Amino acid sequence: MADKPVYEEASIDGQPPKLASIPASDTTVWADASPLLQAACAGLRDGELIHGDNFNLFAAMSALEIMDPKMDSGIVCTYYSIDEAIENGAAPIPISLDSTIDVRCTIDIMDHLLACEAAWHKGHSLAQTVFSCIYLLRLDRTAPHALLHSYCRIIRATCKAVVSVVSDARTHEEEDLFTMTYGLPLNGDGDDKCLSILNAVEETISRQLRACKATSSKRRLPEDLEPLQSNSNLEEGFCKALLCRLRFRKHFFHVLSCMKRPQGRGLESARKHIASCLTELESILESADFLRSCFDESCEGDIDDKTTASGFEPIGFDAMLNSRLSAPTPPRAIKILSWKKAVEYFVKLLHDLDVICSYSLDPHLESLLRFVVQFQKSQPDLVARSHLQLLLVQDGKLYGRDPFFAVINKAAALPEATKNHDIQKNESFLQLGMLVMNLLKILCTNAAWQRRKLGKFLQDWRVIYVQLELAFRNEYGEVSSSSNDENTCMKIFQHILLWVEEQTYWIAFRFLILGFELELYSTGEYCMVYWYLYAVLIKLTEKTHLMMAVSHDTAKRKGKKKKDSSKDLARESRIPPAVLFLQCYICLAEGLTMMLAALRNEIPVFHSPSPFNTEHEKFVQHFELLQRACIPDHVSYPSYKESTTHARFSTLAMYNYFKDAQRIAKEVKSSFSNDPERLAELRKLEQVAEHNSVAQNVICRLGALDPSLKVSFEFSHHPFFATVVVKRS
């Protein structure tokens, strides 16, 4: 069977298409398939496909639509091979015989590669971004051009390092194209020497810059030093523009290398290189004015949309040259980030990496979870999240040094001596260690993937709790209050069972609030969401309080004088600040639930049924994963209806949940004076409580049935506790 021909795109005027310039060979005979295609089209109705017996859904999704520019990977190609592109002068070496233009074009290539790299980090394929550069595809050709050669080598080595990090972290399920290299020349001989080659080029340009800055009497260049280009007035500006770009690449490569060192040993060095990267990026931005002013030619279009600082189109790129390598599906239509956006991306990436490097590697799991959640609030991209995960989990240990049983031991408030106990070899404890490790990995994924995984993950935590409880009962029978402290194994089981429960409800809490971040809840569903959040928070607060009591018992004094016992009892009777913090959440969740229920019960517009699914179906859709894991127990749609059906503003006026939240937030602030994150959170909670208390009073005073009353919700003060806005039309 003869291969089908590849045609260039047919012209609009109906002229026959020209055959592509791909020569026939001894094994290939080109045949005109147009009559066959026309006959097939005439016999097909709209929506029908020609397919073989083994055609399936995946094949249908991967099918090419011949002669459709968006679906046919061959039709939009300018060149059909790298050799053809080079033969047609798409990537000349030297770039220009005019040395001044050659330097400017080299800088344009550097800038466009930076923009391509940022687009790749954002999820586009490597083949259609960074490796759209023909010079990278034939790196040996750049050897005579030392400047371009050194830059291309460091780019290739950087891409390899990033692919390695993301592949090792395995957090790229949602960015499935990121680590696919499609056989591209990512591994080159001598790439380990890329820094030495770059340093040699940098030193040469640095000498040239020093010569430019010398006084006029000393301005004569050394005999072995030639100028970069022919225009002496532009020499200093070009030297500076090149140096900051080369130095950025060097320091960024060092950042990636240092951060991958085991057990966080390279974090301090990485921070120094991050600071240098940020300095060089500032210099790169400053070089734009010079690059735009050194040529009289004006660039068409908005300069902010350009992928180079000069505004000129770069030489040596073809985004569609590797389109057939991209996937077994049609190539994606991608838009490379502008040069300014690319610089902004790298600035943010470096700041995110700096946050990771500045972390103290705290072995306390609670502090670590808070750090990861706080870090995710800045919405870090894939590369930063991958580095975080690799730092946290190395060789099956926390930070590559702390066994997870020891981490759990500390989190469960057990004595230090028990961290090496033989009980850790028990199958259930081994599985629990794996769950903690997987939890850290899941928390490093993006919000959508994280929520999906956490919802399914809850059942694993529920199962491990049941397994531990069964093992405990088989070994020791029912829990007894007598002489528990004398049995170390019993104490380990008791503490860890309680900690697993607390952790399970924390995961459920995280699962629910991620729904607000992802905007999964509509206004009409807020009532049920806050009601479920309230139910989870009640259990989380209960378990947290018990864990803190257990922790206090573990650290209690021995041999204290009897006269101090009254003081200890008074101290123990106080509610811990961490528990009060959660109680503030509870008051807000309960207050919003009751207010929303009252609005639904008294204002018809808030009770309008959905034309697509019932309230019960929505309840199942949002909380099915929690219900499967029985989190919390005895929570169901009927119990939700029973709790909210009789809510009225007349009863809300008697008890103001928001006032309680406001009071707790004010009281507990002083306890977190050394914790800026929680202090900021308390201020947000206080604002929400204050505004909602006022809104509730306004509705109660004016009457919910007032037709001029307009009630809406916004998240201006807090990401998941809504602020009620009341207006009169």
Image (cartoon, helix red, strand yellow):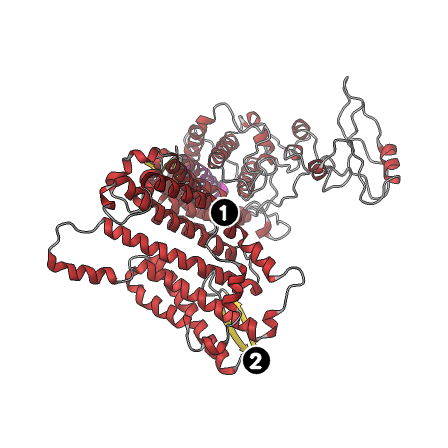
Q: What element carries label 1?
A: helix
Q: Which amino acid does label 2 sit on?
A: Leu
Is 257 left or right of 53, judged from the image as shown? left
Callout 1: 10 Å neighbours few (<14), some, many (20+)?
some
Is 459 left or right of 499, judged from the image as shown? right
**C-alpha gap between disc 2 and disc 1:** 42 Å
Q: Which residue reaches farthest front?
A: 477
Residue range in magenta is: 234-251
Residue 705 bears which disc, if any?
A: 2
User: Vertically, is 77 above or below 512?
Assistant: above
| Camera sees residue 351 | yes
**Residue 236 magenta-highlighted:** yes
User: Vertically, is 617 above or below 686?
Assistant: above
Is 351 left or right of 648, judged from the image as shown? left
Q: What element carries label 2?
A: loop
Does the CB distance between marks 2 and 1 fall below 8 Å?
A: no
| Camera sees residue 364 | no
Q: Residue at x 26, y 39 (%)?
A: 418
Q: Which residue is drawn at 88% across and 39% down?
A: 43
The residue that mark 1 highlights is 450
Nearer-the-camera pick, 661 or 419: 419
Q: Which amino acid does label 1 sit on?
A: Gln
**Residue 292 magenta-highlighted:** no
